[in-house]
Amino acid sequence: MTRLTRDEMSKALAEMNDAFNAHDLGGVLEGLHEDVYFENWTGGRVRGIESLRAAWAPWFKDHGGFQFTHEDAVIDEAQQKAVTRWRLDWPSTEAGYEGLHETRRGVDVIRFEDGKVIEKLSYSKTTVEIEGNRVRLGA
């Protein structure tokens, strides 16, 4: 069983972020375990790398230039876990704001196994900025 050092975990997270920002789905998936479990901020769940590829493919194809900015990370080498804080800039998908510039902030809780990301749980704030105005998201 491969265990990553803190520096290796940090590097893996940076490489994944770079691949997201290059809109390189294959590059993102390279860092994920075959049995990865992903949960998005709306509660959608996917298990397995091929299921995740299928779920993310439309988003990467019609990416609208999305960009993630890594803001901070807490990395626990002993537990092989990390919590990352990020900012996402992209064309909004919120009803009534479609296509307008949106800034969304959130965190990912990430767990590594055998040197790859086995679990990625994404959480987002319920207030976003659209065209510089704060918009509270509906339930």
Image (cartoon, rainbow, N blue to C red):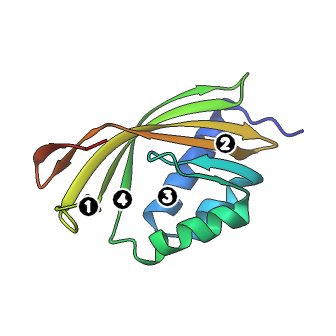
Question: Disc 2 on helix, strand or loop?
Answer: strand
Taking 133 as reference, is 74 left or right? right
Residue 98, image x and y in percent? 22, 66
Given this view, does label 4 or label 2 mark the residue nearer the observer?
A: 2
- Give the label on residue 30, or none: none
Instruction: Find out whether the residues at labels 1 and 2 contact each other: C-beta distance under 8 Å.
Output: no
The foreground one among 103 and 37 is 37
Answer with mark 3 or mark 1, whichever residue precedes in sequence: 3
Question: Disc 4 on helix, strand or loop?
Answer: strand
Instruction: Find out whether the residues at labels 3 and 1 contact each other: C-beta distance under 8 Å.
Output: no
Question: Disc 3 on helix, strand or loop?
Answer: helix
The amino acid on which the numbered mark 3 sits, given as a three-letter code, is Asp
- What's the distance in space between the residues labelled 4 and 2, CA to CA? 21 Å
Question: Which residue carries the number 3 mark?
Answer: 18
Name the image quarter holding the N terminus.
top right
Question: Which residue carries the number 1 mark?
Answer: 92
Name the image quarter holding the C terminus.
top left
Question: Which residue carries the number 4 mark?
Answer: 67
Q: Is residue 134 above or below residue 53?
A: above
Given this view, does label 3 or label 4 mark the residue nearer the observer?
A: 4
The amino acid on which the numbered mark 2 sits, given as a three-letter code, is Glu
Taking 73 as reference, is 80 left or right? right
- What's the distance in space between the residues labelled 3 and 1, CA to CA? 21 Å
User: Residue shown at 56%/54% (left/top)?
Assistant: 16
Answer with mark 3 or mark 2, whichever residue precedes in sequence: 3
